Image (cartoon, rainbow, N blue to C red):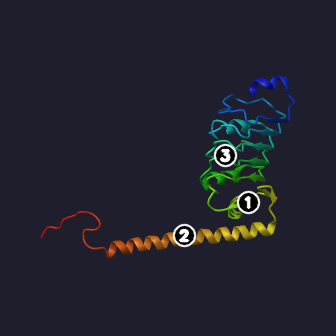
């Protein structure tokens, strides 16, 4: 990718789809200063830290598409991706909400496409959208649809109810475990022997 930069210094949009790319190891510092849109769809990029984060130095990058790769994480560090407004990360391997929460730190990010990742596979499209809207307060577009104010309020309420429900369920399980230990027959928990 870096090798073409001297020949196209004013390049604003670059599509490198389905090229079998496994890494973007070259430094992009001072390169592609006009690049606004970048598409790496259907490659084999597996590391956010080593591959995608290398793009964070592009000062005008507004739209990034990394659909169909092998990314398992998302991470943000202060100063990176200053102009990024749109991120499409469908069909990857993101499996925890902690990684999705990193998106709320991107200073200009207002559009996210996040579908067909292990994290959202079992909860359905509608629930996944509600959780994304609730967890990412700056979103104005989620999976291609406008986020309206009423939807945001409803999503946040449902998210809080869900969190409270999970918290209460965890407390009830803990109480049940304590009760089970308290009333368990002798010798059930451990093999301590008593001397008389």
Q: CA distance from mark 3 to mark 1?
A: 16 Å
Q: Badge 1: how crowded within 10 Å, few (<14), some, or many (20+)?
A: few
Q: Which mark is residue 107?
A: none
Q: Are marks 2 and 3 in contact (CB under 8 Å)?
A: no
Q: Is residue 150 left or right of residue 135?
A: right
Q: Quadrant of the C terminus?
A: bottom left
Q: Which residue is mark 1?
A: 137
Residue 117 lies, in percent from the top left, at 65, 52
* Vertical side of 54 occupied by 137: above or below: below
Q: CA distance from mark 2 to mark 3?
A: 28 Å
Q: Residue at x 67, y 62 (%)?
A: 124
Q: Are marks 1 and 2 in contact (CB under 8 Å)?
A: no
Q: Which residue is mark 3?
A: 76
Q: Quadrant of the N terminus?
A: top right
Q: Residue furthest right?
A: 10
Q: Which residue is mark 2?
A: 167
Question: Which tag, 3 or 1, sits closer to the chain's start?
Answer: 3
Q: Residue furthest left?
A: 196
Q: Residue at x 61, y 60 (%)?
A: 122
């Amino acid at each position: 990718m870096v090798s073409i930069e001297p020949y196209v210094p004013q390049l604003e949009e670059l599509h490198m789809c389905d090229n079998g790319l496994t890494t973007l190891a070259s430094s992009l510092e001072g390169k592609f200063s006009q690049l606004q849109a970048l598409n790496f769809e259907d490659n084999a990029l597996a590391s956010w830290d080593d591959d995608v984060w290398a793009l964070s130095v592009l000062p005008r990058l507004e739209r990034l598409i990394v659909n169909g790769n092998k990314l398992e994480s998302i991470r943000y560090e202060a100063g990176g991706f200053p102009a990024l407004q749109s991120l499409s990360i469908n069909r990857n391997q993101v499996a925890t909400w902690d990684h999705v929460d990193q998106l709320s730190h991107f200073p200009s990010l207002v559009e996210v496409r996040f579908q067909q990742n292990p994290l959202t596979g079992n909860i359905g499209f509608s629930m996944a959208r509600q959780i994304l809207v609730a967890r990412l307060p700056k979103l104005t577009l989620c999976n291609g649809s406008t986020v309206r104010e009423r939807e945001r309020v409803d999503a946040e309420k449902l998210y809080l109810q869900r969190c409270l429900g999970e918290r209460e369920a965890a407390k009830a399980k803990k109480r049940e475990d304590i009760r089970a230990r308290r009333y368990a027959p002798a010798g059930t928990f451990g093999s301590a022997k008593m001397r008389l």
